[in-house]
Image (cartoon, rainbow, N blue to C red):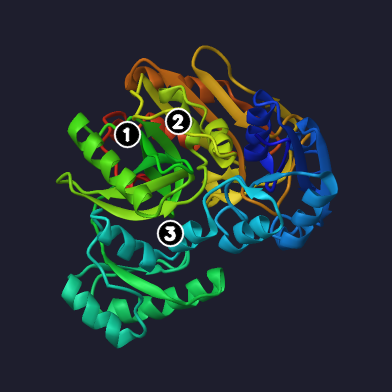
Amino acid sequence: MFDKILIANRGEVALRVIRACRELDIRTVAVYSEADRDSLHVRFSDEDICIGPPPARDSYLNIPRILAAAEITGADGIHPGYGFLAENGDFAEICERSGLVFIGPTADQIRKMGDKAEARRTMTAAGVPVVPGSQGTVGDEEEAVVEARRIGFPVIIKAAAGGGGKGMRLGENEEQLRRAFVMARNEAKAAFDDPSVYLEKYIQRPRHVEIQVMGDQHGEVVHFGERDCSVQRRHQKLIEESPSPALDEDLRRRMGDAAVRAGQSIGYQSAGTVEFLLDLDGSFYFMEMNTRIQVEHPVTEAVTAVDLVKEQIRVAAGERLAVHAPPALRGHAIECRINAEDPENGFRPSPGLITAFHAPGGPGIRIDTHVYAGYRVPPYYDSLIAKLIVRANDRDEALSRAYHALDEFIIEGVRTTIPFLQRVLSHPDFAAGDVDTHFIERLA
């Protein structure tokens, strides 16, 4: 097991890793930018070290500074959290060459799943259903038109090297496809320094259902059930829940088996998520694999009673998985992401000083956050400031618990998405479980 882990991240996920390390009796090192000096992850770590000014490129994305911090503090492992360098194959490889254990999958696994076109080929070979699309990247507009005719309109253009909705455009006909193709390539180049794109059949009203997997260094891969992430805005998730109201036991088993095959096909090690699009007819298609711990991992922890971060650390240390079969999903869990944004003003970021902060409590309520009254939300990073996770005996009780917990959540000084989340939770379609990835567009 590790003696000391450096957490190459910030905010609530860094604090989450610190808590897991404490229970494993592992010392922790927090790195922080000058803007995060007063964050709780810095306060509660065993050691801390400043790695640069506020811009991420000068701090959290600066690999030499992070490695120097690990060397100075004597860390033997690095946990990347999510975002920043978590899915950077070069970073994972450099850690290994520097004698540090990267607490995640191998560099090759990150790269193989990070290249979306390569991931599609790998999944097809493994017998995992994929959305009909181009066999690889598409080089120009004319090739895109030929591929779209073969696939059938509408199609969606996606950046081969990215995610999060960047470099993603819809082509409903040839004329729109030509315009969208140029824009998608430009966006992909700007976001990922790689203009490569590929085409997929556009599924009209899909649900976004992902399967949590974990693999160890001894060849075992297990899934931990699903999370329904269909409530999202501009491809950014807002609310996640488990189990999905759209899955029965047979579909859950088939999707879980497909996710395990996906992990086994690359010898996957660590925590990961296989993301699927679920069509109205019950067909499901591989979308991508996230080779890291997810923002919404507490939803799975709530219904399986498995600490995924501790398990991730253990397998990185060479231990075998503690769970050898998919655990039963008990009760129902919902996570609401609370962002410092103004929903009434186009979800514009709302950085600033938090003047009052009161977290809800009671049975089945968990709050993951790094903020407090007197904390200043910086303008440089993602606007996520807290996650509300509730667990209850069934979905109706979880919906009620989540709504009233949001009602008790007091955050003053900055605008937040709490009122918008309550609006979603109380919507008749959401209450009925009748949502898809376009639900928020229709709500707005």
Question: Which secondary structure lies at badge 3?
Answer: helix
Residue bearing mark 2? 299
- Can you give x and y, in whole percent of width and height, for residue 13 in the image? 62, 39
Residue ID at (48%, 38%): 296
Query: Looking at the rendering, in which quadrant would you find the N terminus?
Result: top right
Residue at image location 41% in from the left, 24% down from the top: 304
First in sequence: mark 3 vs mark 2:
3
Residue placed most toward the observer, 409 or 330: 330
Q: Earlier in the sequence, mark 2 or mark 1?
A: 2
- Mark 1: few/some/many CA within 10 Å (<14, 14-19, 20+): some
Give left or right: position of 79 versus 152: right
> Mark 1 or mark 3, which is nearer to you?
3
Front label number (3 vs 2) = 3
Direction left: furthest residue: 281
Up the image or down, 49 lies above or below 94; here it is above
- Give x and y (percent) for residue 163: 46, 60
Q: Distance between the residues labelled 3 and 2?
A: 24 Å
Disc 2 residue type? Val
Task: Where is residue 95? Give x, y as percent.
Answer: 67, 56
**Secondary structure found at label 1:** helix
Q: Which mark is residue 430?
A: 1
Q: Describe the element under mark 2 as helix, strand or loop.
A: helix
Q: Nearer the viewer, mark 2 or mark 1?
A: 2
Number of numbered discs: 3
User: Disc 1 and disc 3: Cα gap in Å?
Assistant: 32 Å
Report the side of 133 relative to 55 (left or right).
Answer: left
Q: Which mark is residue 113?
A: 3
Cβ–Cβ below 8 Å for labels 3 and 2? no
- Choose top left, top right, bottom left or bottom right for residue 432: top left
Question: Is residue 397 among what the camera can see?
Answer: yes
Q: Residue furthest top?
A: 363
In the image, what residue type sits under mark 3?
Answer: Met
